[in-house]
Amino acid sequence: MKNVYLSLENSLENQQLRALIENDSQFNAVDKMNDQQHYTVIVNGPLTELSNLLLNHYSLKNNIDEVLFIGGTDCYGDVTTVGEKNVMADVKSAQSVFLSGVKVVVCGLNVTREMENRALAGYVYLKDKSVFTLENCGIFIETKGTVCYGKMVNDVYSDAQFADQHCQMVMAIDKEKYLTFVNKY
């Protein structure tokens, strides 16, 4: 059984995601993490809670198998021309999570914008990762600029690569497979 820690904003979509995970016998939804077990973390909202957890309990980093971040973007923003709302809500926390070394899978605005309930990407990812096309990459968050403040900078399309490639960016979603999962629930 996979332990799943959820860091979700309060919304109807996230309530639906939480209910699916809590009612699925393959998963154990937990409210707290400890250093005795391993976890998959799903974040749909700002990365503040996870950043604080990693800063205050750094040893837990080794117990997080991966973080699925339903947020960010590899191209355009929804708050600014380059900033997505979950990153822009707390830019410095977002940067600290991406610098932590924890594996982060970004399911961003570029692939979820057309979805009816993008929060369910977390559940579908847990059930069948083959629905998603992933690219390894390095990711940093611009924390100093004025024009690009909050931009998620990645090296997916670049000849120059970041030295640290511990992240993955979802580049595409098989919509037919995705809808098969979503329509069951």
Image (cartoon, rainbow, N blue to C red):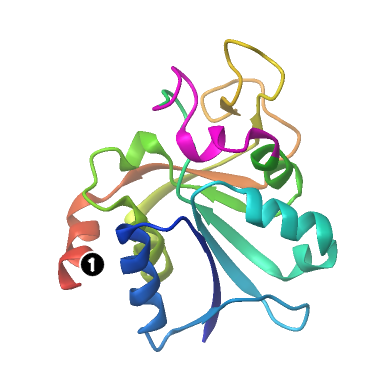
Decide if residue 111 is on the left or right side of residue 157: left
- The location of residue 81, given as percent across then percent down, is 44, 17
Q: Is residue 36 above or below residue 60?
A: below
Mark 1 residue element:
helix
Is 143 colored magenta in this rendering? no
Q: In this picture, which residue range is highlighted in magenta?
A: 78-92
Residue 103 is drawn in which quadrant?
bottom right
- Residue drawn at (66%, 21%), measured in percent from left and top? 160
Q: Is residue 144 above or below residue 1?
A: above
- Classify 128 as above or below 84: below
Tell which residue pokes out farthest to the front in this image.
Answer: 10
Q: Is residue 106 left or right of residue 155?
A: left
Residue 8 falls left or right of residue 113: right
- Going by the numbered disc 1, the residue's amino acid type is Phe
**Where does the C terminus fall, quadrant-wise?**
bottom left
Q: For the point 34% across and 39% down, which residue is it?
A: 111
What is the crowding at mark 1: few (fewer than 14 residues within 10 Å), some, or many (at least 20)? some
Q: Disc 1 marks which residue?
A: 181
Q: Residue at x 41, y 23 (%)?
A: 76
Q: Horizontal and vertical percent for residue 18?
A: 40, 71
List the single residue furthest toward the top.
147
77 sits to left or right of 57: left
Residue 115, percent across and down? 24, 46
Residue at image location 64% in from the left, 66% down from the top: 65
Which quarter of the picture shows residue 21?
A: bottom left
- Count of numbered badges drawn on the protein: 1
Q: Which of the 4 image quarters holds residue 112?
A: top left
Q: Nearer the viewer, residue 73 or 129?
A: 73
Residue 17, given in percent of the width and then of the height, sits at 36, 67
- Nearer the observer, 81 or 61: 81
* Predominant SS along the magenta part: loop
